[in-house]
Amino acid sequence: MDKIQDEIIEEFSVFDDWLDKYDYLIGLSETLPPISPEHRTGQYLIEGCQSRVWVDARLEDGKVYYAADSDAIITKGIIALLIRVLNGRTPQEILDTELYFIDAIGLSANLSPTRANGLVSMVKQMRLYALAFQAKAN
């Protein structure tokens, strides 16, 4: 997971200003596979986000796979980054991973307070899925 985080840091390092980084995030939003319509309901909606964000997860062969969507394009790019780092990992790996790329690329510092709170809520929800899968396995 550190390798993927380092790749993300490297990708963002080529941009000098945040407008370019936002453009890059918007481009990343297009890489997010669509979430199935039955998961675009209140049950999968993340509380604490300024925009609407839906996250679902499934456990397959001991690894967690996420699906997500948002009605805000920058938020969709952010969730695409989180999925890129956390997808296909064991619940324990997800729980143990420090998502250092968020601060390293300046994401938290350059989001509005409500978007930064939303980012924290997205990470929390993804970790809660991992925790639930881990508890179910034990």
Image (cartoon, grey):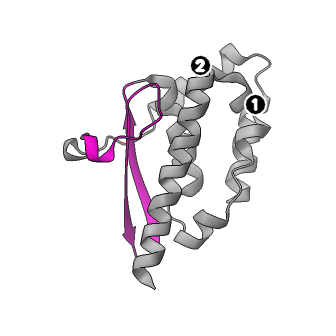
What is the x, y in percent for residue 79?
A: 51, 40
61 is higher (above) or lower (below) than 5: below
Q: Is residue 19 left or right of residue 138?
A: right
Q: Residue at x 79, y 31 (%)?
A: 13
User: In the image, what residue type sits under mark 1?
Assistant: Gly
Q: Residue at x 62, y 24 (%)?
A: 113
79 is higher (above) or lower (below) than 14: below
Q: Residue at x 32, y 46 (%)?
A: 44
Q: Residue at x 56, y 48 (%)?
A: 123
Region of the chain picked out in magenta, as a range: 42-71
User: In the image, what residue type sits under mark 2?
Assistant: Asp
11 is higher (above) or lower (below) than 127: above
What is the x, y in percent for residue 110?
A: 70, 23
Would you call the spot at circle 2 few (<14 residues within 10 Å), some (14-19), or many (20 or more)? some
Can the viewer see residue 90 in this picture? no
The label on residue 106 is: 1
Can the viewer see residue 124 in this picture? yes
In the displayed orientation, state which residue is furthest to the front: 48
Helix, strand or loop status at disc 1:
loop
Q: Nearer the viewer, residue 13 or 122?
A: 122
What is the x, y in percent for residue 8?
A: 69, 42
Helix, strand or loop status at disc 2:
helix
To which residue does mark 2 refer?
23
